[in-house]
Image (tube, rainbow, N blue to C red):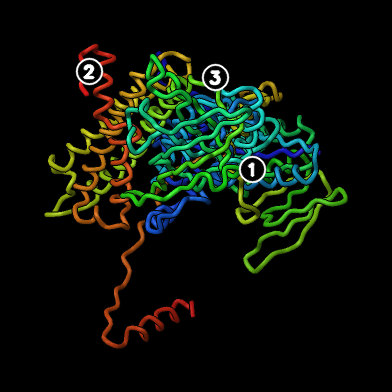
């Protein structure tokens, strides 16, 4: 069985993203970059399937600059078997749909039975890439999995909803996006780190995947970011001084918000 | 000349940092209060393979060097924890790795790598022989296929948390040897087999550094427990000592960075008389000065580690690294405590705990005065000063 996990290197998510005022892209230079913590859940999900089904091949795939190799190495250190990095200056400025198109082409080469993604990345948050990948591969998409099981050539998930969960299934091959409640990702152990450097990583360009420079990157983008603004600062709250009626005042306030 | 860490070394640093994050300041604070051993932390470290870093791959370890081992221990102290609970496994290993025979290595190393056996205790110092190691009185007498050992050790740390003890004993009395460093032998003692012939009495100390007096009465060990050749034990422990100096230096660097970060953050945030206290040179400069000394000591630490890993002579550098790093971390500790004022003494800030812990390294595992004496006499060729 072949499982492909899509991963992305993102600026350290505990910091605040800085935007380049000219290109309106997230600044990635001079910031610590890490494997998106959201991707660790999909890698862990793949590794758990691998442990239960010996012989399963787990491949981590990423599109990004050369240094995104670090994110792939981390996936390999956790236990994945192989990495694929699509890295090409022509890809800079790709929009979400182009990213999905390129990733889908890279994934296809791995002949996957299952493709796992995070629901969205922790830097740009478009959440469109998994759907785009499923579209380009012509595969069903099961989203927001908080539990995932494989049986009889099918994948069944518990799909997280606001009210609870839905149980849905699809025939393999399929694309599944997983949430942060699906598992607790493992830390790479020393042996994993040592083995990671010996594991194969395919480095591909857009041309290797059959794309011309016009089809990808800024030139191929159909979506344009027009502007950005920082989130509004939270307004100062109301301080209620207790003159004996504080509890009533707080209760009234919460009732007004229909919280109680 | 290359100053950057390799990609692998950076991954090691990152992974240990993440593991350490699981163990909060509250965890270390509670251990300190209860004078307890960080069992859970040491288990997590062992399971992830970190304490097997130096064990060759053929014996199920990672086959890394002292440089990488020092990065692992530095990160533990930098995280606010204390590597003293397990650092000995790294440096004691030096004698076994370089001088143990094939049978000893193939029996013990995989078990240590898997965490089934802990090699955490090192019995060298005695009540009447501290840094003057050749004067130790513990005697091992050969009787057929085994040795009978009698004597006493002190400051034997982690005895209760170790399965094995690396023990230095005289096999030839000092009066009968021409070279005082001769006639000493090194034994790898199985503490479970030793039973009641070894008794440990804990010593209460300023820091939570589980340490003991150890009494050895008619301890019978098989001749196969001897490391290398009889009488050459002193030479074998030099490797462990140099490794130990480098590793302790790295722990001090970790402590120093913890203090400097904590101090500079507080100095920038704490507002008194309408401005951050760090805007005062009297507060800012001692922190910057400590930082400068940490950076300098760190370079000597990496040089010493590199020499050790290249199997080159490294005693001066290893000792200097320990001297400079322990001085720098102690300087940083004081700057941090002073910056925090009274809060620095409050247990919940963790400064007083780290302050006590890092103070140890100006006097142990070798007193800094003796490092200076060594440098004066053996590096600078001045007269013996002690």
The residue that appears at 41% across and 26% down in the rendered structure is B241
Q: Residue furthest bottom?
A: A244
Name the one closer to the observer, B202 or A207.
B202
Local crowd at mark 3 within 10 Å, few (<14), some, or many (≥20)? some
- Judge depth for marks 3 and 2 and give the one in front: 3
Secondary element at image label 2 = loop
Q: Can residue A219 be seen in this view?
A: no
Q: Whole-Å distance between the Cαs marked 3 and 2?
A: 30 Å
Picture layout, residue B382 above or below residue B142: above
Q: How far apart are marks 3 and 1 (CA)?
A: 66 Å
Which of marks 2 and 3 precedes in the sequence?
Answer: 3
Q: For the residue labelled by badge 3, is the local secondary structure a helix, a strand or a loop? A: loop
Quadrant of residue A222 within the rendered picture: top right
Give the residue number, with chain letter if any, for mark 1: A129
Q: Quadrant of the C terminus of chain B?
A: top left
How many labels sit on residues?
3
Q: How crowded is mark 2: few (under 14 residues within 10 Å), some or many (20 or more)?
A: few
Q: Which is more foreground, mark 3 or mark 1?
A: 3
Residue under numbered circle 3:
B229
- Please determine whether, in this image, residue B374 is positioned above or below residue A161: above
Residue A19 versus residue B222: which sits nearer the camera? B222
Asked if B163 appears above or below A253 in the picture, the reply is: above
Residues at discs 2 and 1 in contact (Cβ within 8 Å)? no
Residue B359: x and y, percent? 28, 41
Which disc, if any, is residue B384? 2
Q: Which chain carries label 2?
A: B
């Amino acid at each position: 069985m072949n499982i492909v996990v899509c991963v992305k290197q993102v600026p350290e998510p505990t910091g605040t993203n800085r935007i380049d005022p000219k290109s309106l892209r997230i600044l990635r230079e001079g910031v610590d970059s890490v494997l998106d913590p959201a991707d660790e859940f999909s890698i862990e999900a793949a590794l758990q399937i691998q442990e239960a089904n010996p012989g399963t091949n787990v491949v981590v795939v990423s599109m990004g600059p050369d240094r995104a190799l670090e994110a792939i190495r981390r996936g390999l250190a956790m236990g994945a078997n192989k990495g694929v990095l699509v890295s090409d200056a022509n890809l800079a400025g790709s929009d979400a749909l182009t990213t999905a198109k390129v990733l889908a082409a890279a994934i296809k080469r791995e002949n996957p039975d299952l493709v796992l993604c995070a629901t969205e990345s922790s830097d740009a948050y478009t959440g469109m890439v998994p759907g785009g990948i499923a579209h380009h591969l012509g595969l069903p998409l099961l989203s927001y999995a908080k539990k995932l099981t494989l049986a009889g050539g099918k994948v069944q998930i518990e799909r997280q909803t606001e009210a609870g969960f839905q149980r849905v299934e699809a025939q393999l091959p399929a694309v599944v996006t997983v949430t942060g409640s699906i598992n607790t990702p493992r830390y790479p152990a020393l042996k994993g780190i040592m083995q990671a450097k010996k594991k194969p990583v395919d480095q591909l360009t857009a041309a290797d995947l059959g794309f011309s420079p016009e089809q990808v990157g800024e030139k191929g983008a159909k979506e344009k970011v027009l502007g950005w603004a920082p989130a509004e600062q939270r307004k100062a709250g109301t301080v209620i001084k207790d003159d004996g009626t504080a509890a009533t005042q707080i209760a009234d306030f919460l009732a007004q918000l229909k919280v109680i | 000349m290359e100053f950057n860490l390799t990609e692998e070394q950076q991954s090691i640093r990152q992974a240990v940092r993440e593991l350490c994050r699981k163990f909060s300041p509250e965890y270390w604070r509670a251990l300190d209060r209860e004078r307890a051993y960080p069992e859970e932390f040491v288990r997590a470290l062992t399971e992830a393979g970190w304490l097997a870093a130096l064990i060759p791959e053929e014996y199920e370890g990672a086959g890394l060097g002292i440089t990488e081992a020092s990065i692992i221990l530095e990160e533990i102290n930098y995280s606010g924890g204390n590597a003293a609970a397990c650092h000995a496994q790294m440096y004691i290993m030096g004698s076994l790795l370089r001088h143990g025979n094939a049978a000893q290595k193939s029996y013990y190393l995989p078990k240590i790598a898997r965490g089934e056996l802990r090699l955490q205790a090192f019995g060298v110092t005695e009540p009447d022989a501290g840094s003057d190691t050749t004067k130790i009185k513990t005697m091992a007498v050969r009787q057929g296929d085994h040795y009978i050992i009698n004597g006493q050790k002190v400051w034997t740390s982690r005895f209760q948390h170790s399965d094995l003890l690396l023990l230095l004993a005289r096999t030839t009395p000092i009066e009968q040897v021409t070279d005082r460093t001769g006639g000493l032998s090194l034994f790898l003692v199985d503490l479970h087999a030793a039973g009641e012939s070894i008794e440990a009495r804990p010593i209460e100390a300023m820091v939570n550094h589980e340490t003991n007096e150890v009494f050895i009465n008619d301890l019978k060990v098989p001749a196969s427990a001897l490391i290398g050749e009889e009488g050459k034990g002193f030479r074998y422990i030099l490797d462990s000592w140099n490794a130990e100096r480098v590793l302790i230096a790295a722990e001090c660097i970790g402590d120093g960075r913890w203090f400097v970060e904590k101090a500079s953050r507080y100095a920038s945030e704490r507002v008194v008389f309408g401005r951050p206290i760090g805007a005062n040179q009297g507060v800012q400069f001692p922190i910057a000065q400590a930082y400068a000394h940490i950076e300098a000591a760190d370079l000597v630490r990496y040089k010493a580690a590199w020499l050790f890993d290249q199997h080159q002579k490294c005693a001066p550098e290893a000792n200097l690294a320990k001297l400079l790093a322990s001085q720098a971390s102690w300087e940083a500790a004081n700057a941090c405590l002073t910056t925090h004022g009274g809060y620095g003494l409050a247990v919940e800030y963790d400064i007083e705990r780290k302050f006590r812990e890092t103070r140890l390294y100006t006097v142990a595992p070798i007193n800094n005065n003796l490092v200076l004496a060594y440098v004066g006499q053996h590096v600078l060729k001045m007269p013996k000063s002690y």
